[in-house]
Amino acid sequence: MNRFLLILFLGLFAVNVQSQSKIIFSRSAGKLNSGATIDLMVYNPSTKKIKMLYKGSVQGRGEYGASTSPNNSQLLVNTYLFGGWKLGIADFSNGKISNLRRFTKRSNYEYNAKWSHNGSLVAYEEFSWNSRDMDLFIANKNGENVKQFTNAKGGDLTPHWTRDDKSIVFTSDRIDNYDIYIKLLDGGVITNLSNHSSNDYAPSTSGVNDKIAFISDRKGVVSLFTMKYDGTNLTNLTPGLSSKINKSEDFENSGYWAYQTSWSPDGKQIVFSVLDGLDLEIFIIDSDGKNLTQITDNEDSDLSPFWIN
């Protein structure tokens, strides 16, 4: 194969890989927090088609907050299948979920797990029934050797690994309102990156550059922002998003848990969820703020989107 044909082949291969990247999210019928069962869905950006991935396992509960391993062979998800909210791990192959089982053997409620980029560790939230606080924990990929990563009054939530796996970005209300924080894996100072009087939450990190996406109500409406790991280069990507569907009190009324942001594998797009009336809808936008597109539009609640690696 000559050099030109090789380059052409590699280029077509890269385009095909990107075209296969899909978005997992959860859907419950009707208004958010209405008690409907939560199912796992999958959206194909190439065909713009949505199909059910996994039927909610427990009536009135179900599964949400799914994320896949770096090689897409496994999936972690919040599930009520094992008595209370626990982390489940499942095999994920050919677009199908199978063999859903407990991830850890711990007694506390567990939520929102994310794999490190090298696939060796998992960061997640754990709720203590004694302190009534939510803190971050880290386990190995088999759900063992669990170690506490943060310890504060209030809630440390939605962990995401920096692309070098040396730090974890998360949101916390340890001071008063929710802000975006970062902490080195080997300890050290916890740094407040957003440090604003409004609520900043639902952070996610790009796998190709040192950027964080998050949602904030600092402009009086719920908007999507990006910034660097050090909190600089703050950019509002959605200044034109209608205030009728993004009132700042929506966050207070529904809670942080339903909101999520996630980067596409190539770092060129971000998917996120916002409240539209009384139900959540999902949007995609280019990482430079162009081409805002709503991908769900119904009377159901579509939440916690995650872009498959």
Image: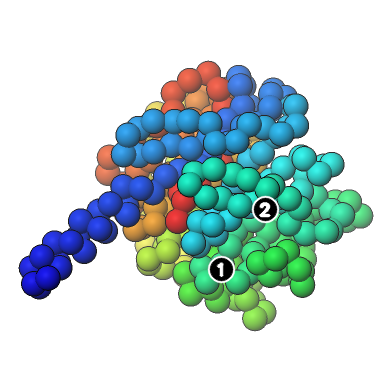
x 61%, y 27%: residue: 28
**Relative image position of residue 91 (x, y in whole percent):** 61, 52
x 53%, y 31%: residue: 52
Q: Quadrant of the C terminus?
A: bottom left
Amino acid on which the number 1 mark rests in the picture: Gly
For this rendering, which residue is in front, 87 or 123? 87
Q: Quadrant of residue 134?
A: bottom right
Amino acid on which the number 2 mark rests in the picture: Ile
**Relative image position of residue 278 (x, y in whole percent):** 58, 22
x 67%, y 53%: residue: 89
Label 2 packing within 10 angstroms: few (<14), some (14-19), many (20+): many
For this rendering, which residue is in front, 263 or 174? 263
In the depicted structure, whether residue 11 falls above or below residue 121: above
Please say which color scheme the image uses. Answer: rainbow
**Relative image position of residue 110 (x, y in whole percent):** 75, 52
Q: In which quarter of the image is residue 191?
A: bottom right
Instruction: Provide the residue designation for mark 1.
Output: 119
Q: Quadrant of the N terminus?
A: bottom left
